[in-house]
Image: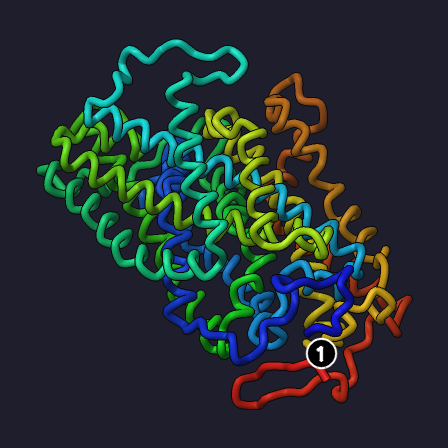
Amino acid sequence: MDSLHESLSNRDLAPVPPSQRTWSMWNITALWIGMAVCIPTYTLATVMIAKGMNWWQATLTVLIGNLIVLLPMILIGHVGPKYGVPFPVFARASFGTQGAHIPAIARALVACGWFGIQTWIGGGALYSILGALGWIDTAADTEVVSWLGITSLQFLCFIAFWLVHVFIILAGIESIKWLEVWAAPFLIACGAALLIWAFVKVTDDASLFSSETHFAEDSGFWWVFWPQLTAVVGFWATLSLNIPDFTRYCRRQKDQVLGQMLGLPPTMTFFCFIGIIVTGATIIVFGEAIWDPIKLVALLGSKTVVVIAMIALLLATLSTNLAANVVSPANGFSNLLPKWIGFRLGGLITALIGIVIMPWRLYSDLQEYIFTWLLGYSALLGPIAGIMLCDYFLLRKTRLDLRGLYDPRGVYRGINWIAVVTLVLSVLPNIPGFINAATNTAGTEDAIFWSFFDRIYAYAWFIGVGLSIPIYWLLMQLTPARAAPAPLDKVEFSAKADTVALN
């Protein structure tokens, strides 16, 4: 480890030795439960209901989307137990030791946006807790700070929750592991309690399972299904890239594969189902659809129930945010300057950017949240996933020169321009649709680009992956030396644990 070049390595980027790979299948399952049980998951399917789907169509869309994204999640996660390297180091094989900054920072910036959104949601829960306890008067708190767009009390609650993240970041990645393990069963229980509340409050349970749809005249099921499916895939397109940041701590491939299979699709589908049923119950109980669980919990009446429920929401948000939106950007920023930036400093940079972007503005509109935010970055991250999958499995047959990943003059040196060109070509078809969505002109006479591009944009992630794999494979045939698998004598394999060590 000590001989790795300091310009490309530090304690956090170096391969995890087999003796330190202590994560079991349950750790990965708990990680996914902790990440998937969050407010954006709860609200994800309610957007589909608003678009016209019924309960089972929305639930099925969520399940299919998560089964789709599970495949690249497991495949890219393969490099973790085998080589013990994090995502930015793995990206060096396809993009080059310097070119890897492109996918690493692209992923990091998306995570910073998510970090801000989740912290804002948690701050909102804290704001409601203080209001329920009578410590602040939320009804009288109406004076908005002009340059912020929110009240000063809302901002202070946001900062308070932000400081909790900072404390855990400074404690290191092992603290995140234990938080996920302890939070997982509690979060499942809280979700089940919400579901029970819905069935208790509604006398006619059948009313919660209406099969009626209400699509707009100019749309139908398939018109709604594809962009929503892409949004579901895009929800975890981020983690499908940097999942090696976690699987590198797994003892065996079996742990990461089964852990992800048990943790991701079932939890996402179950919690989205809870969101659908509970939101349906609010229409009957309160006379309106309350998709935001923070607003719902505030209406439950009992201060004790409100506080316990809000603490659960805070824990759900915290466990998701730390694992999904801190680890990757921390490693990505560390990859820029390994000598100066480690995991903790990288995490602090992430936290600071999460404030600067003013996430409450991004999350204020669900339509914009789905079609601009989720679809937008899935158009960027899909091609990166395609390039990495093609490079690792189709070209290199999962054989990497581990020392070369840390050698500025090795086989992966510099920038692999073929990966960069592939990324640009694969993103291009989605740019017109993204611009239409970002300017809120999609489907209108004022649209900047033809409606044809809006249809393409609905498949953003799929188009990105589908284009990047063949383009990258074909172009890499021009440089067979760079695309060749590492000779077997470059690595030492352990058949039992499927791990690798430096020679």
Dot 1 falls on a residue whose secondary structure is loop
**CA neighbours of label 1 inside 10 A, class few (<14), some (14 to 19), many (20+):** some
Depicted 357 relative to depicted 7: above or below: above
- Report the residue that reaches farthest toward the right: 478
- The residue depicted at 59 percent of the width and 22 percent of the height is 440
The quarter of the image holding the C terminus is bottom right
Residue 437 occupies which quadrant of the picture?
A: top right
Residue drawn where x is 63% and y is 75% of the image? 83
Q: Position of residue 247 (x, y in %)?
A: 52, 68
> For this view, does 23 lie left or right of residue 107?
left
Q: Is residue 148 above or below residue 280?
A: above
Q: Amino acid at mark 1?
A: Arg
Front one among 176 and 102: 176
Residue 390: name its quadrant.
bottom right
Q: Residue 37 versus residue 395: which sits nearer the camera? A: 37
Depth order, front residue of 168/461: 168
Residue, disc 1: 399
Question: Whole-percent x and y of residue 37?
Answer: 36, 49
User: Compared to 390, does 242 lie above or below?
Assistant: above
Q: Which residue is more in the foreground, 148 or 172?
A: 172
Residue 124 placement, left or right of 450: left
